[in-house]
Image (tube, helix red, strand yellow):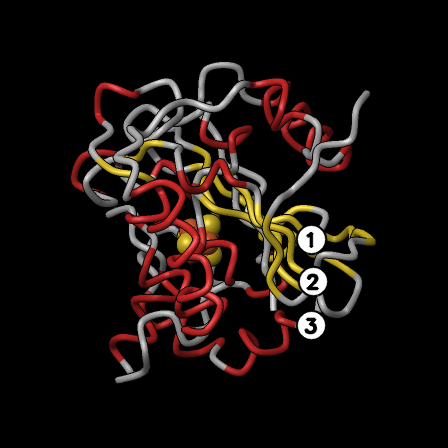
Amino acid sequence: MTEKIFPLEYKGLKIDPVIFTQGFVPACNIGICGGECCDWGVYMDRDFKDVLTKFEKEIQDVMDENQIKDSSEWYEKDIEVDSDFPSGFAIGTETYTTKSGNEQCVFKDSNGFCSIQVMAMKNNMHKWAVKPKYCIMYPLTIVDNILTYDEEHSAKLHYCGINHEDNFVQTVFDAMKEELIFVLGIDCYNFLNDYYEKNYKSLNKKPHLPRHDEHHQIIKISEIKRLDIANQKKDNIFHKKNLKEYE
Ligand code: SF4
């Protein structure tokens, strides 16, 4: 297999140009999708668990009656070696099954909202102050130190996903400005935006779908296993995902 060349790099982070062309919906809209992207939980840095532990009671306070309040059941037991995380290890959030039969992240409530974000806003913190960064970034992700589009996860989603191009009105890069600035910083965003303006926007290139073979190359084996296991467990329910915490 030919190794893919990435023409753009920011301080060692490789940039997959798909982020400048992949289409996306006008905005995330839980009223339409019900927060479907949260149905598999998320991978976050192993040490980020300590950050969430500090807000355990506050998170429990905003959870609804169906969510799991026992924090010992919030995370998967297995910790994975993963160089995309600062500690070198990743841990996944657990899922639970709602009364209506949907399996979803332990932090997703019955309205489709993230209890971590609800807690932060209720306590006058920035909405993403303690939210796993791969949740913030979705549908963008970082895999093997490459900023890219999370095609594998996106393929499962019924509104914003890669197979629903009729809903696309902009690129993911345009859609994710606030998120990119928050996670990667304004200097990185400006660097990416300069490139985007010169090489895509000024040429009026239309958003398009990436070729599947390009992106499957960088999906990690561990993530594929995670998806396979989830799919075996729940045939008719759509799940989330290979989002990951990245710091
Ligand atoms: S932590 Fe919050 S945003 Fe991330 S998957 Fe769970 S519910 Fe969704």
Q: Answer with left or right where residue 150 lies relative to residue 11.
A: left
Looking at the rendered structure, the kind of residue marked 2 is: Gly
Q: Counting residues from the N terminus, which is met first, the one under dot 3 or under dot 1?
A: 3
Q: Which residue is mark 3?
A: 47
Q: Residue at x 31, y 31 (%)?
A: 205
Q: Nearer the viewer, residue 219 or 108?
A: 219
Q: Quadrant of residue 215?
A: top right
Q: Nearer the viewer, residue 123 or 177?
A: 177
Tag 2 near tag 1, CB within 8 Å: yes
Residue 61, percent across and down? 34, 72
Question: Image point 31% across, 63% down: which residue?
Answer: 178
Lower sequence index among marks 2 and 1: 2
Circle on res. 12: 2
Check disc 1: other Cα within 10 Å, few if <14, some if 14-19, many if 20+. some
Tell me: is circle 2 under 8 Å from ligand 1.
no
> Is residue 107 visible in this depiction of the protein?
no
In front of the other: 222 or 100: 222
Between marks 3 and 1, how big is the CA–CA gap? 19 Å
Locate residue 64 relative to residue 199 in the image: left or right.
left
- Label 1: which residue? 145
Measured from the top left, where is residue 101 in percent x and y? 39, 28
Furthest residue to the top? 235
- The quadrant in which residue 116 appears is bottom left
Q: Is residue 118 above or below residue 208?
A: below
Q: CA distance from mark 3 to mark 2?
A: 23 Å
Q: Is residue 84 above or below residue 183?
A: above
Where disc 1 sits, the SS reads: loop
- The number of numbered badges drawn on the structure is 3
Residue placed most toward the observer, 32 or 119? 32
